């Protein structure tokens, strides 16, 4: 029986942030309930012909905590009823302003054991500039609520490169987060000027963002948060099991509007239009062996452990060092990558320019 990670997309938000290009929008409770009915129907249709074990579940969005009370429980109940259920990690993304105590109690009771809160920055001024509708005090109240409900595994998202943001703001934000034992994981993302957003024409200072990242990396490392993926830092044992499945190309099924899946090296994408999603329209892409290998290399090099040479050989029946001898020689000469008998990985100090290094393997 196949183990599979389950992703649930909740596309609703109270308001849209200035940088956000995700498929999300405001909807009232009646519309939300109608969406959940279709989502549960999709779950039942999939499992009708597929008997699988759900071993991780992740609610993303949008803002899943904006969903009406009882909605998350009904979705988890549907997963329990239609999958062989052995989920050891159930995560939910939340925003501080919608993370009220009754919802936190609901999440705890239905088995959620990992809360991910979008803070972005501890500066109220920068939050306002970014179009966030919460304050740092709202975030602290949300953390208190998590503790009261019995959660001890919280992730916090922060952003780098916001307009008017300085390195000092990043250090102050991290110092504030280090005061909370409940925070076991921190995700750190650089701002990108995405199309079809209010900030699509924004000139992001890439050099300053890189300096922010380097400063934050040292602070996180010194405070017990080890980097296991380019944007993700965790206390030992608190790495996100669900996201690691993405980076290691394990099978996952996505339910909901614009959700994606990977099953047996076939990628599926639900429509990003609600009318098409409701009637079950989705795209299917059967990956070639070359595409599979490229994905494997790109995703593995995002992680601090890099490419496992034996695992590569097992999957692709080839010797990685022989096949990629030229880029390995070139990158090793400049000490950009590090090699052991088991692994090849990007050197820690060059992770910030990871993309250009990865491209060397495909040039």
Image (cartoon, grey):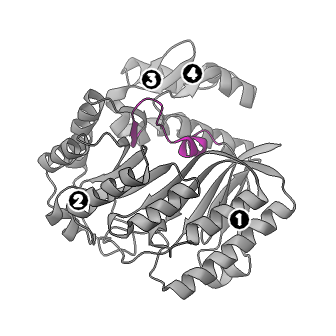
Q: Residue at 64%, 42% (x, y): give it.
A: 249
Q: Is residue 362 visible?
A: no
Question: Over which residues does the magenta segment extend?
Answer: 230-249
Tell me the residue that label 3 is attached to. Answer: 330
Sequence-wise first label, 4 or 1: 1
How much space separates mark 3 and mark 1, taking CA atoms? 52 Å
- Distance between the Cα atoms at labels 4 and 1? 49 Å
Residue tagged by mark 4?
Answer: 325
Cα separation between marks 3 and 2? 35 Å
Q: In the displayed structure, would residue 243 be above or below residue 149? A: above
- Please tell me which of labels 3 and 2 falls first in the chain: 2
Task: Tell me the element at label 3.
Answer: helix
Residue 181 disc label: none
The residue under label 2 is 162
92 shown above or below 64: above
Mark 3 neighbour class, 10 Å CA radius: few under 14, some 14 to 19, many 20 or more = few
Residue 84: percent from left, percent from top: 77, 50
- Please state, as top left, top right, bottom left or bottom right, where the N terminus lies in the image: top right
Q: For the residues marked 4 and 2, what is the alpha-carbon distance in whole angstroms?
A: 40 Å
């Amino acid at each position: 029986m196949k183990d599979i990670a389950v992703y649930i997309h909740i596309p609703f938000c109270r308001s849209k942030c200035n940088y956000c290009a995700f498929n999300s929008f405001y909807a009232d409770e009646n519309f939300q309930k109608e969406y959940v009915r279709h989502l549960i129907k999709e779950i039942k249709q999939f499992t009708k012909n597929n008997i699988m074990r759900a071993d991780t579940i992740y609610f993303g969005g949008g803002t899943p905590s904006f969903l009406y009370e009882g909605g998350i429980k009904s979705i988890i109940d549907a997963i329990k009823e239609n999958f062989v259920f052995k989920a050891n990690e159930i995560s939910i993304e939340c925003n501080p302003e919608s993370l009220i105590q009754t919802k936190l109690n609901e999440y705890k009771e239905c088995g959620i054991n990992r809360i991910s809160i979008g803070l972005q920055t501890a500066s109220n001024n920068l939050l306002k500039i970014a179009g966030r509708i919460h304050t740092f005090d709202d975030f602290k109240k949300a953390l208190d609520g998590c503790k009261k409900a019995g959660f001890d595994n919280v992730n916090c998202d922060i952003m780098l490169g916001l307009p008017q943001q300085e390195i000092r703001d990043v250090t102050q934000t991290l110092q504030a987060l280090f005061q909370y034992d409940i925070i076991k994981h921190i995700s750190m993302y650089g701002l990108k000027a995405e199309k079809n957003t209010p900030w699509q024409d924004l000139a992001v200072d890439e050099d300053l963002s890189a300096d922010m990242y380097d400063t934050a990396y040292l602070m996180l490392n010194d405070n017990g948060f080890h980097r296991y993926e380019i944007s993700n830092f965790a206390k030992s044992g608190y790495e996100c099991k669900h996201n690691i499945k993405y980076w290691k190309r394990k099978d996952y099924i996505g339910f909901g509007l614009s959700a994606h899946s990977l099953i047996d090296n076939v990628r599926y994408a639900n429509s990003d239009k609600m009318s098409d999603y409701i009637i079950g329209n989705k795209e299917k892409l059967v990956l070639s062996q070359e595409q599979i290998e490229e994905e494997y290399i790109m995703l593995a090099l995002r992680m601090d452990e890099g490419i496992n040479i034996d695992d590569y050989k097992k999957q692709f029946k080839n010797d990685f060092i022989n096949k990629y001898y030229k880029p390995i020689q070139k990158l090793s000469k400049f000490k950009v990558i590090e090699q052991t008998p088991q692994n090849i990985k990007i050197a820690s100090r060059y992770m910030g320019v990871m993309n250009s290094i990865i491209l060397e393997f495909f040039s």
